[in-house]
Amino acid sequence: MILFDIQNLQKASLGARIGWAVGRAIALSLAIFLVSWLMFILLFSLFPEGIDILSNDAWGMSLYWLVPLVATLFLVFIMRTYVDMEPMSTVGWTLVWWHREFPKGLWWGFSLITAGFLGLWWSGQIAIIGFQLDWNGLLSWAFLFLVAALFEEILFRGYLQTMFSELLGMRAGLVLSALLFSLAHFPNENFSVIGGLNILLAGFMLGLVYLRSRRLWVVTGLHFAWNYFQGVIYGFGVSGMRTYKLLQLELKGSPMVTGGEFGFEGSILSLLILLAFIYWQRDVLQREHHFKKTEIISEDEFKV
């Protein structure tokens, strides 16, 4: 097994590294699906009455994300520790600076979505037609989006971006993880071309933020706040998902401007905001010399 660890594979040919990178990504995805399926079977056998995980109850829907989160954490630990022969800290799973980085991510996500909401409101593209306070809705959807953000960040940024970067280079890791992130959202309801492009850009954004800290807390906070404030607080859809909404909106403008049923992520304004944030993060990374290295990322670059 040690013959196929990251440090040995870095010395292999490009074709071999591509093959192993793709193979590991496919193997991990299939393993997550299988382990999650077995966990669901076990849960339903322990609770014969069942749990409607596809209902509109956010507490029930949280199980849909909590099970694959646990499966992903377990399998990434196995892959990283016993196959890649690297510590979990190299995929951003560490408590270092979490109390500073998670709030920073929350602030960035809140600021980006708020800028988009205010821009559409001031320009008359949306109108606020109601307000409905439900503490259970606020808390249950917060839990759901936090679990979902943790699951996606551990998988796409933590393991896949890190593994691709180590085997194929930093830029390849960023591009491939963002592409897989967007492809995973293709089945979403009311999917659009602009929505798909925006999710791809969101993948780039999150990947760039992850490169700066090499820890999961900033990107998890950013991802959570982007989804939570977009759907629950400001009343848009979230990648086609319908949530409890604190504000009730009327979408008056074109779906290309407001995002339509897909949510703010389906709008041109979202695209512009994401591009601006990506440009800023890329500029910061260049000034911090992250992109001056074109070679494969070494083990020491990921250690905290």
Image (spheres, rainbow, N blue to C red):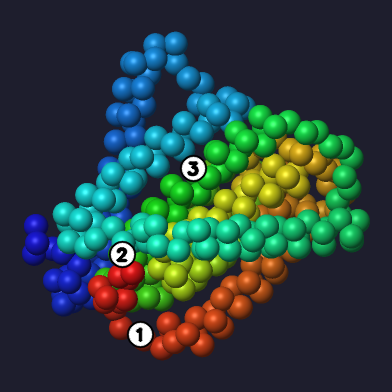
In front of the other: 129 or 15: 129
Residue in the image at 47% along x and 85% along y: 288
Against 287, residue 61 (above or below) is: above
Q: Which residue is mark 2?
A: 90
Task: State the separation of the CA atoms marked 1 and 2.
Answer: 19 Å
Which of the two labelled residues, at mark 3 and mark 2, occupies the earlier sequence position?
2
Q: Is residue 27 left or right of residue 240?
A: left
Q: Is 185 placed left or right of 292 in the picture?
A: right
Residue at the (47%, 59%) spot, across then down: 98
10 Å crowding of disc 3: few (<14), some (14-19), many (20+): many
Closer to the camera: disc 1 or disc 3?
A: 3
In which image quadrant can residue 23 be found? bottom left
Three-letter amino acid code of the residue under disc 2? Thr
Q: Could you say where residue 26 lies in the image, as x and y percent from the top left?
A: 29, 52
Three-letter code, disc 1: Thr
Q: Which residue is mark 1?
A: 294
Q: Which residue is mark 3?
A: 147
Q: Secondary structure at mark 1?
A: loop
**Where is residue 87, by image quadrant?**
bottom left
Please report whichever mark, 1 or 2, sits nearer to the chain's N-terminal start.
2
Q: Secondary structure at mark 2?
A: helix
The picture places residue 65, in percent across and down from the top left corner, at 46, 38
**Amino acid at circle 3:** Val
